[in-house]
Image: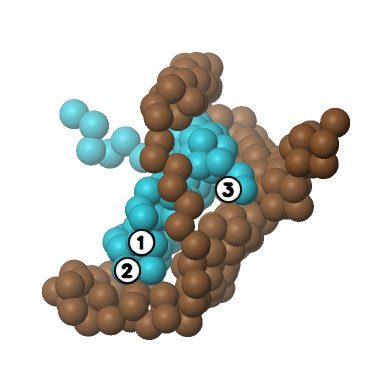
Chain colours: A cyan, B brown
Amino acid sequence: MVSQTWYLALAAFVFSCGLYAALTRRNAIAVLIGIELMLNAVNINLVTFWRYGSMAPMEQLSGQVFSLFVIAIAGAEAAVGLALIISVYRTRHTVNLDELDMLKG
Amino acid sequence: MSLPEMSALFPTLQEVIFVLFALLIAVTSLIAAMAPNLFHNALGLVATLFGIAGIYFMLEAEFVGVSQILVYIGAIATLITFAIMLTRGMMFGRTSAMNRQGLAGAIISGLFFVVLLGIVFQVPWPNVVADITDGEALIANLGALFVSTYLLPFELLALLLLVALTGALLLARDR
């Protein structure tokens, strides 16, 4: 049996990759990809804690329920985010985040 | 040397499969985060999502694994690919793919990873492994939870999806 620690370490790595993409990428779609990576890393943690954290995994299913909620909300987030990106692209002809500073005082 | 001691030296099949999935996820999530070409990012994301679905199957959360494949790879990855093609003009820009915070971002996320790893290896996690006897009954329990304990969040989620998708249509429509 693979120990819980290794699943958590893998999730930490995926989360850090997503964080790096969200912090440093210039293209808005790449930032969204980074956010998806972070959401997935959290989901790995939730499912791992469900599997290894309870004596009765057949009844205590909160970890799985929460991960399904996260998946569904990630779907809504991706749809709205990409629609915003397409809308911005129509009016400004760029999706580079450092050129989108109209709201800067 | 007795047989149990010998077998402790070799990795079990499960460990081998875990290492393979972990390597796949590590390499492809690096591609998804760092490759300068946006299309390679999207393909790396798809491969990462597949690997994570495999991790769910290893953890015996089959329903989550199947939803991962259906929702993430079926819908979100397709959506991202479409958005890349619709905003293609900026795909091969003259400027670099990174913004000016490249070094700071690398330091922050690297430090974050080290701190998380330290916590993960320090904390004494419970690590109980209770056997899952009946996978079908587990999925039945999951469905029952969604219409009893988690009924209100479930209905709110349905409303959220409706609002988000109509809102997305409204935002992206050609005026």
Q: CA distance from mark 3 to mark 1?
A: 51 Å
Percent across and percent down for residue B107 are: 50, 17
Percent across and percent down for residue B32 are: 61, 45
Q: CA distance from mark 2 to mark 1?
A: 6 Å
Q: Which mark is residue A56?
A: 1
Residue A8 drawn above or below residue B99: below
Identify the element where label 1 is drawn: loop
Residue that numbered label 2 is attached to = A59
Identify the element where label 2 is drawn: loop
Q: Quadrant of the C terminus of chain B?
A: bottom left
Residue that numbered label 3 is attached to = B90
Residue at horizontal 64 percent and vertical 55 percent from the top: B51
Q: Quadrant of residue B92?
A: top right
Residue A17 drawn above or below residue A51: above
Residue at horizontal 28 percent and vertical 81 percent from the top: B144
Answer yes or no: is residue B103 visible. yes
Residue B12 drawn above or below residue B159: above
Please state which amino acid type lies under the numbered disc 1: Ala
Q: Are marks 2 and 1 in contact (CB under 8 Å)?
A: yes
Residue at horizontal 32 percent and vertical 68 percent from the top: A59
Answer yes or no: is residue A80 visible. no
